[in-house]
Amino acid sequence: MSELMATIGAIVAGASCGVAMYAIAGGREGIDAASWLARRRQAQPAPGADPQGPWSKALDVAGARNRLVSVVDRAGWKESPERVAAFALALSGCTAVLGVASASVMPVSSAAVFGVLGFVSGLGSCALALRSAVAGRRRRLAAELVPLLELFTLELSGGGSAFSALGSVTTKVQGELAFDLRRLLIASQVAGSLPFESRLMQYSEHLDLPALASLATILGASREYGTGVVHGVRALATDLRHAQRRELIAHSRRALNHVLIPAAVGVLLPFLAVVMFPAVTALQRNLY
C-alpha cells in the first residue's frame, strides 16, 4: 500500500510541476480596451433571456475568469489569470502530496483526509496572498492620495482650471495613483469618450476607494454648476489626514499590545515563578 501511495504522490507531483512550468512558459496576456468591452458585452445577459440556474452559475467559467481578472487587477499583479490559477493548482497539488506523504504510515482514509486538507490549505494560501495584495495596494493608493490632493490644492490656488491643475500635478508626481489618474485624464480627452468624473467614479468602485468617488463628485459639481473646487478638495485632504492619524494611533496601540502581552507572558511569569519558588517550597515543607 505504501508503494501505491508513493506512486500516486509522484504522479500528482509531476503533473503539478508540469502545469506550473506550462503556466510560467506561457505567453503574457495583455488587457486592452477592445477585449475588455467584448468581455463586458458577453457578461451582460440578453434582454428577455432566462436566468441561469445554480448549476449554470457554478459552471460559468467565463464569469469566474472575469472575476479573477478583476481581483488580479485590483492586486496590481501583471500576471494573467491562467497563470495565477495554474500556480494555485500546482501549489495545492504539492501540499496535497505532502499531506498524503506525511500520512503514509496511517490508514488509507487518514491519508485521503490529509491529502484533501493539504489541497484546501494550498488554495487557501493563494487566496489569502491575493487578498493581502489587494488590501496592501488599496492602502498604498490611499496613502498616495493625500499628498496628491494637497499639491492639487496648491495648483488650484495659483489659478487655472481644475483639470489642468490635476494634469500638472499628476505629471510632476511619481506614483502608481498619479500614473493612473494621468491615464484617465488622457483617455477622457478623446472625442466621444466618457468624462473624467465618470472614469474616476468607475476607478473608485473598482478599487473600493471612497475618497476618489468624493473627488469625482467635487469635480462633477464644478463642471455642472460652476462651483469652486479648492474648498472641497482641501476639506477632503484634511479629512483623509485625520483618518490617517486615527489609523496610525490605533495601529500604535495594537503594536504596543503585541509587545506587552508576550513580554508579560514570557518575562513576568517566569520572573514571578523564580521569586515565589522559595516561598512556595517553604510553605509546602511547613504543611507536611
Image: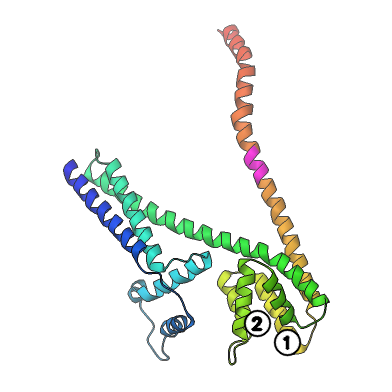
Mark 1 surroundings: few (<14), some (14-19) or many (≥20) residues within 10 A: some
Depth check, front residue: 37 or 121: 37
Q: Is residue 257 magenta?
A: yes
Residue 145 occupies quadrant? bottom right
Q: Are marks 2 and 1 in contact (CB under 8 Å)?
A: yes
**Where 172 sits versus 122, above or below?**
below
The image quadrant of residue 139 is: bottom right
204 on left or right of 234: left
- Asked whether, in this view, residue 37 is left or right of residue 190, the answer is left
Taking the spot 78% from the left edge, 70% from the top edge, the residue there is 235
* x and y percentages locating residue 150 in the rendered image: 76, 68
Instruction: Give the magenta range.
Output: 255-259
Q: Which residue in the structure is indicated by mark 1? A: 223
Where does the image place residue 124, in percent across and percent down from the top left? Answer: 42, 55
First-in-chain label (2 vs 1) = 2
Question: Any mark on residue 197, and which?
Answer: 2
Q: Quadrant of the N terminus?
A: top left
Kindly state the secondary structure of the residue where label 1 is placed.
helix
Residue 122 horizontal side relative to residue 156, left or right: left
Q: Which of 203 and 106 lies nearest the eye of the viewer?
A: 203
